[in-house]
Image (tube, rainbow, N blue to C red):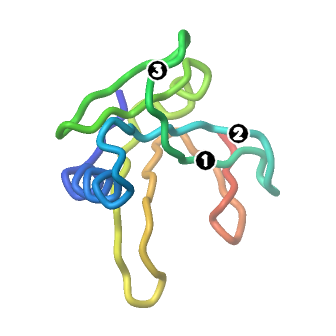
Amino acid sequence: MIVLTDTAAKKVADLRLEEGKPEWGLRIRVVGGGCSGMSYELGWEDSEADNDNVIDQGGVKVYVDKLSASYLEGSEIDYVDNAMLGAGFAIKNPNVKSSCGCGQSHRF
């Protein structure tokens, strides 16, 4: 299971309201690429696809295709706002075996 923290759920809800799209959910995918082999892709989705796992946390839907779900099992999605590093969604994934120096690509 993937967990969306309360902070991340609030940020998604706030962003939906800013965009005037209260029906949107958060799409997360694991895609090929990067120097370590795989990276995360986040975006908006307004409905689930046939092969999706749907997680509803804090009134926010998270859509994950079945292939990505196998890589993301046990992960936590948080929203962090750090003065030095900036703000954004952070994924803590226990399945990552290694990552590149920039932290944008992972090997599972």
Q: Residue at x 68, y 71 (%)?
A: 102
Q: Which residue is mark 1?
A: 40
Mark nearest the camera among 2 and 3 is 3
x, y (%) of residue 82? 37, 81
Q: Pointer 1 and pointer 2: residues touching (CB < 8 Å)? A: yes
Q: Residue at x 42, y 74 (%)?
A: 87
Task: First in sequence, mark 3 or 1: give its number.
Answer: 1
Q: Secondary structure at mark 3?
A: loop
Residue type (three-letter) at the residue carrying disc 3: Glu
Task: First in sequence, mark 1 or 2: give its number.
Answer: 2
Q: Secondary structure at mark 2?
A: strand
Q: Nearer the viewer, residue 36 or 53?
A: 53
Q: Which residue reaches farthest front? A: 20
Position of 43 with respect to 76 (left or right) is: right
Q: Which residue is mark 3?
A: 48
Q: Nearer the viewer, residue 21 or 90?
A: 21
How far is disc 2 from disc 3 in space, using C-alphas?
18 Å
Q: Residue at x 44, y 32 (%)?
A: 46
How far is disc 1 from disc 2 in space, using C-alphas?
6 Å
x, y (%) of residue 100? 71, 62
Residue type (three-letter) at the residue carrying disc 2: Val
Q: Is residue 66 above or below residue 63?
A: above
Quadrant for residue 108, please give it. Answer: top right
Position of 30 with respect to 69 (left or right) is: right
Dot 3 crowding, Cα within 10 Å, few <14, some 14–19, many 20+: some
Mark nearest the camera among 3 and 1 is 3
How far is disc 3 from disc 1 in space, using C-alphas?
18 Å
Q: Secondary structure at mark 1?
A: strand
Q: Which residue is mark 2?
A: 31
Task: First in sequence, mark 2 or 3: give its number.
Answer: 2
Q: Pointer 3 and pointer 1: residues touching (CB < 8 Å)? A: no
